[in-house]
Image (tube, rainbow, N blue to C red):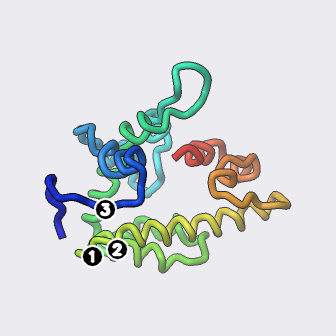
Amino acid sequence: MEILPGDSITTCLSPLVHDLICNLGFELKEICDINSIVTENGEVRWEAITDRVRYEELGQSLDYRRSVQQLGPVCEAIHLHISALTRAQFEIQYSPWYQWTTYPELFLEILDALQSSQPAAVSLGVMKLASCLERALGNVFLLVGKECPFLLRDLLASAELAQVFGHAVNILEGL
């Protein structure tokens, strides 16, 4: 199902949120080299992400709109890279990085969703992935902390996760 530019879409999202999700990340037409984002071993080069996160002129408040706009080409490069992999290639390259989640088969399910022709498959996959990561990160938090934050945003900003993963994990809180 392809949506044409003139088509009207009914949504419960506010116009600003709709623009953020559907337009803003696609505005920059820049090609990112996947090798500048992910190493040959499948490790994320965090600088490729943190260098594109933008902050307000005054203070350290995250400029969410500019960050989404700057990260759009990075997300597109990752999407194209992962979509081009076969299931076997994906497993070989990335399985060591998602085994800790205790639900590794979900990542293969999401790979299938990326290659699906079903319009809702990718969205559902992202929702499942977020839930899986939230639970796994909560389990990691409990290895060093006592009371796990209720919200994923607060969990990602915690000193406990920074202690385990390093401060690069805190950048995810804004995303």
Front residue (pair 138, 67): 67
Q: Amino acid at mark 3?
A: Thr
* Screen quadrant of the N terminus: bottom left
Q: Amino acid at mark 2?
A: Ala
Specify whether 9 is left or right of 1: right
Mark 1 to mark 3: distance in Å?
A: 19 Å
Q: Secondary structure at mark 1?
A: loop
Residue 76's spot in the image, x, y percent?
30, 51
Specify whether 175 is left or right of 148: left
Mark 2 to mark 1: distance in Å?
A: 5 Å
Between discs 1 and 3, the one toward the N terminus: 3
Q: Secondary structure at mark 3?
A: loop
Q: Amino acid at mark 1?
A: Gln
Quickly name the residue at label 2. Answer: 121
Residue 35's spot in the image, x, y percent?
34, 46
Specify whether 97 is left or right of 125: right
Task: Count neighbours of disc 1 (C-alpha within 10 A) and say few if under 14, some if 14 to 19, many if 20 or more.
Answer: few
Quickly name the residue at label 1. Answer: 118
The quarter holding residue 118 reads bottom left
